[in-house]
Each structure stands twice: as structure tokens, then as C-alpha cells.
């Protein structure tokens, strides 16, 4: 099988600058869009979304640094790792990226306190994995509808209290030295229309899950057009934040 991929990174209608970054293949993009097709299960690849944390300085730098370093480190992983060893190596890489971001803040190589979320889909030797820290999200859409695969690393989610504002992040790159990474396999994708949606909260805060599901259900053969439709809908709903998303669809090779 193969994967069709479309990525879009948009400033939105309110923010003065774009602090999001998307990674697709070996390229980082901001304020643009890109499409690709990846043969699978051969080789490895990474599609990621990094969202510089609002209210903190240097979010645009943090997202670019983390997206670039995660891309390089996952590309450099050894071949033939067992699933257990792979999880250890990816988590270790993420901890090192987090430590490096904090050091850059201390040494004045970026902005003090800069931080970012990061969520990615990583293809390694025939399997897909999710890499996740923060409140960007990975959804899966298929015959059973839309399902969120990631857990938001927010105070609301940690305490299970819906009255807490949803934008209080408790875990992200650069936020705290006590950092953790969620890493898990994405299993059993099939050719019957399975779709993965990666997005920053600039999309998921503007569109409800039923609205996201309805748009997924209406996607045509051009995923790039679908990505533009998501961005347009989020902007029409207010575009209060930067909007970044990636669509990945399983197709015949």
C-alpha cells in the first residue's frame, strides 16, 4: 500500500505571526502547503505538527527547532529495532530534544521560556507510530467514524475536570524538565478509506469533532483540496489561532 499526504500551515485570521510548523518528509513548512505520496511499508518517513505555545515568547522558534530536531533524530535511528527498543530510542531522543530546547533558552540562543507541542506520524520498517507531547491531536477516520487517538496533555484532561480551561498545557517541549512523550503504534490501517488527521489546536478549537468528521466524510480524491477546506472552515469559524494540519490516506500502491 501507499500513503497520500497533504499538509497545510496557515496563520489564521487573528494572530500577527505563525508559530506553527509542519514537517513532511525532510522539509519544514510554515505559511504554505505541500502534498506527497509515500510507498509503504518500505523505508521510513515522518509527518509532524509543532505548535509554539501561545503566551510564551519564542513559540515560532521553539516549533521550528523541535520539528527539525525530531525529524533528524528519527531519521538517524538504527535499522532493525524491536518495537520495545524503538519506543525507548524515540522517547530518549525526545527527552534530549526537550533538554536542548531548555538549554537554548538559558543560553540566549532562543527566547527564554520558549516551548512547543509536537505530534507526528512516524513510519518505521512497515509500521506506523504516533509521537505526541502537548495538545495537538491525531485523529483516525474510518468506517466507524472519527476517533481521537491522542490524549491532550492539559490540566483539564489530567484532572478530568471540564470546568478547567482547555489551554493550560502540562506537558510539552521546553515547558518543564519533567517531560514525557506518548509513543504508540497505529495499527490495522486498511484500504477502505482509512484516514489520519494531524492538527494543531487552531483547527480542533475552531471545529467540533462532529464538524471534523463531516468534513472527513466529504473528502474527495484530492487531499490537498481537503486540507484547504479544513483551513477555510477554521478561518470562517473565526481563525483565532494558527491552523496546521496533515491528512494521510491509505491507498493502493
Image: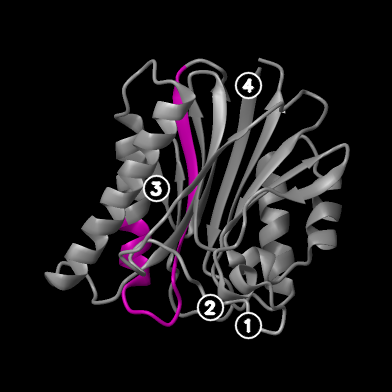
Tag nearer the camera, 2 or 3: 2
Question: Mark 1 and mark 3: span between their CA atoms?
Answer: 31 Å
Residue that numbered label 4 is attached to: 2
Front tag of 1 and 3: 1
Residue 150: horizontal and vertical position, in percent? 62, 52
187 up-or-down from 169: above or below: above
C-alpha separation, residue under disc 4 versus residue under disc 2: 37 Å
Q: Residues within 10 Å of mark 2 (few under 14, many from 20)?
A: some
Q: Residue at x 41, y 64 (%)?
A: 116
The reply to whether discs 4 and 3 touch (Cβ–Cβ < 8 Å) is: no
Which label is found at residue 168?
2
Image position, residue 90 (x, y; %):
38, 38
Per the image, the residue denoted by label 1 is: 165
At mark 2, the secondary structure is loop
The local secondary structure at tag 3 comes to strand
Would you say the residues marked 2 and 3 are in contact, meaning their CB atoms lie under 8 Å apart? no
- Give the Cα separation between the discs numbered 1 and 4: 39 Å
Residue at the image position 74 percent from the left and 65 percent from the top: 233
Residue lying at the far left of the rendered structure = 107
Part of the protein shown in magenta: 43-65
Name the mark nearer the viewer: 4 or 2: 2
Q: Does residue 37 show up?
A: no
Q: CA distance from mark 4 to mark 3?
A: 22 Å
Secondary structure, mark 4, is strand
- Quadrant of the rendering where the N terminus is positioned: top right
The residue singled out by tag 3 in the image is 28
Mark closer to the chain start, 1 or 3? 3
Tag nearer the camera, 1 or 4: 1
Q: Nearer the viewer, residue 133 or 61?
A: 133
Instruction: Answer yes or no: is residue 168 visible.
Output: yes
Mark 2 in CB contact with mark 1 (< 8 angstroms):
yes
Amino acid at each position: 500500500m501507499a500513503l497520500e499526504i497533504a499538509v497545510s500551515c496557515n496563520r489564521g485570521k487573528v494572530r500577527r505571526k505563525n508559530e506553527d510548523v509542519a514537517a513532511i518528509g525532510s522539509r519544514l513548512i510554515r505559511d504554505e502547503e505541500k502534498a506527497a505520496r509515500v510507498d509503504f511499508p518500505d523505508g521510513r518517513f515522518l509527518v509532524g505538527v509543532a505548535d509554539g505555545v501561545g503566551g510564551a515568547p519564542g513559540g515560532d522558534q521553539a516549533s521550528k527547532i523541535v520539528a527539525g530536531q525530531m525529524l533528524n533524530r528519527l531519521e538517524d535511528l538504527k535499522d532493525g529495532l524491536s518495537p520495545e527498543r524503538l519506543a525507548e530510542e524515540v522517547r530518549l531522543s525526545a527527552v534530549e530534544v526537550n533538554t536542548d530546547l531548555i538549554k537554548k533558552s538559558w543560553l540566549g540562543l532562543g527566547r527564554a521560556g520558549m516551548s512547543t507541542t509536537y505530534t507526528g506520524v512516524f513510519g518505521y520498517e512497515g509500521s506506523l507510530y504516533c509521537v505526541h507531547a502537548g495538545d495537538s491531536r491525531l485523529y483516525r477516520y474510518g468506517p466507524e467514524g472519527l476517533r481521537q487517538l491522542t490524549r491532550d496533555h492539559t490540566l483539564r484532561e489530567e484532572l478530568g475536570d471540564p470546568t478547567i480551561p482547555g489551554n493550560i498545557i502540562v506537558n510539552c517541549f521546553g515547558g518543564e524538565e519533567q517531560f514525557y512523550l506518548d509513543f504508540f503504534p497505529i495499527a490495522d490501517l486498511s484500504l477502505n478509506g482509512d484516514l489520519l488527521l494531524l492538527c494543531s489546536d487552531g483547527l480542533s478549537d475552531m471545529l467540533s469533532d462532529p464538524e471534523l468528521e463531516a468534513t472527513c466524510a466529504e473528502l474527495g480524491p484530492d487531499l490537498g483540496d481537503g486540507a484547504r477546506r479544513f483551513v477555510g472552515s477554521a478561518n470562517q469559524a473565526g481563525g483565532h489561532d494558527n491552523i496546521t494540519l496533515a491528512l494521510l490516506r491509505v491507498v493502493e500502491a
